[in-house]
Image: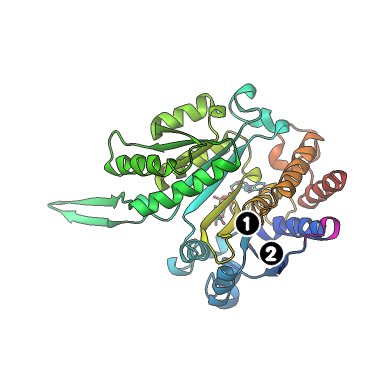
Amino acid sequence: MPNPSLLILPGDGIGPEVMAEVRKIIDWFEAKRGIAFDVSEDLVGGCAYDKHGTPLHDDTMARAQEVDAVLLGAVGGPKYDNLDFSVKPERGLLRLRKEMDLFSNLRPAQCFDALADFSSLKKDVVAGLDIMIVRELTSGVYFGEPRGIFEEGNERVGINTQRYTESEIDRVARSAFDLAMKRGKKLCSMEKANVMESGILWREVVTEVGKDYPEVELSHMYADAGAMQLTRWPKQFDVIVTDNLFGDLLSDLAAMLTGSLGMLPSASLGAPMNNGRPKALYEPVHGSAPDIAGQGKANPCACILSFAMALRYSFDMGDEADRLEKAVNDVLASGVRTADLLNEDGITPASTTEMGDAVIKALDASL
Ligand code: NAD
């Protein structure tokens, strides 16, 4: 069996800084657990534009289609703000998502015990929280036609179209049910079937798919009620599946229940490849953070936890993913904090490298 292959795209700003810490962890898994990855590295975003005049070179795109998983840091920065829309750094990321057809976006909201005080909600509401939002990523109102700003009579009208086919709903529902099977076997589907026909179809198709997963307890909720329930008592949920627009809002809401942007990983999955693994892109939720780039202040945990998701969802190494997530939790519990996780003066924050080293030490302690 060939080693699992991983394409690393550090990108811009703090991307290369946080990715350097992930590289140490990949090396640790090889040295201490005998798990070797076939790792290649390439450019995406502004740095790719600087070298090739495009935010994603065709060769990089082709490599992304071949590997078992892509791990991306972040793209963008003020230097590129005035570039033409077609070559902006973000276009590189969008091309990856589109050409790999990554329709299922996994956004976990997990509250690490040591950070429960960091949430804007009461500690008992968020302590121990571990939910997953599955957002449909390649269809819905962000892509539906017709769209545009048109003249109508003597004024303009802005139009976007919410559109879902049965097969688009079916495939994202299946990915959410599969996930629920690996977790707490509870799935809540959110739409607005009370006022939207696309919501009625969504509910029908999800219910139909549910018949193939009799062990999963399926419920339905209107997305506005879902937003309320997520802030009232989020621990009632295990996996939530929803469309592109509602998922955009609900995943941000749920993620911030747990604290800092520096802690939030994500995965975007597509159809299974010949080897049975889904096409996959893993990336932290945060951007390139130009305000702290190059200063050694970035929290590498979101990128490290994105790699943990790759271990779990691309490489079927759930135990190793647990080991890595526990190491991050142990580091936080021991009081090590990067600056974004400190809200009091007088404590010296850990640097990006110190945080990465602390995770390695915690991994060593796990053996
Ligand atoms: P951002 O996520 O880069 O930063 C928002 C705030 O959070 C900043 O104060 C930053 O210092 C802080 N922050 C973010 N990540 C952190 C980390 N790991 N550790 C500590 N602090 C962290 O969002 P922004 O400022 O709106 O955007 C900056 C650039 O990033 C823009 O060019 C934007 O287009 C791009 N961007 C890229 C992505 C991506 O690559 N997926 C996502 C969002 C924004």
Q: Indicate which disc, 1 or 2, sits on the residue closer to the N terminus.
A: 2
Mark drawn on residue 4: 2
> Image height check: is 172 above or below 67?
above
Image-based side of 81 in relation to 158, left or right: right
Query: Looking at the image, do the residues carrying marks 1 and 2 touch, with CB atoms under 8 Å apart?
Result: yes
Tell me which residue sits at (53%, 76%) in the image.
58
The residue that label 1 is drawn on is 314
**In the image, which residues are magenta?**
31-35
Q: Look at label 1 and name its amino acid.
A: Ser
Residue 22 image-quadrant placement: bottom right
Residue 154 shows in the view:
yes
Does mark 2 have its CB less than 8 Å from ligand 1?
no
Other-residue count near label 1 (Cα within 10 Å), few / some / many at <14 / 14–19 / ≥20: many
> Image height check: is 334 above or below 102?
above
Task: Identify which residue, 357 or 212, lies in the foreground.
Answer: 212
Q: Position of residue 157 (x, y in %)?
A: 22, 50
Q: Position of residue 26 (x, y in %)?
A: 76, 59
Quarter holding the N terminus is: bottom right
Task: Identify which residue, 70 or 200, lies in the foreground.
Answer: 200
Distance from disc 1 to disc 2, alpha carbons, whole Å, reads 9 Å
Majority secondary structure of magenta residues: helix
Q: Position of residue 237 (x, y in %)?
A: 53, 31
Mark drawn on residue 29: none
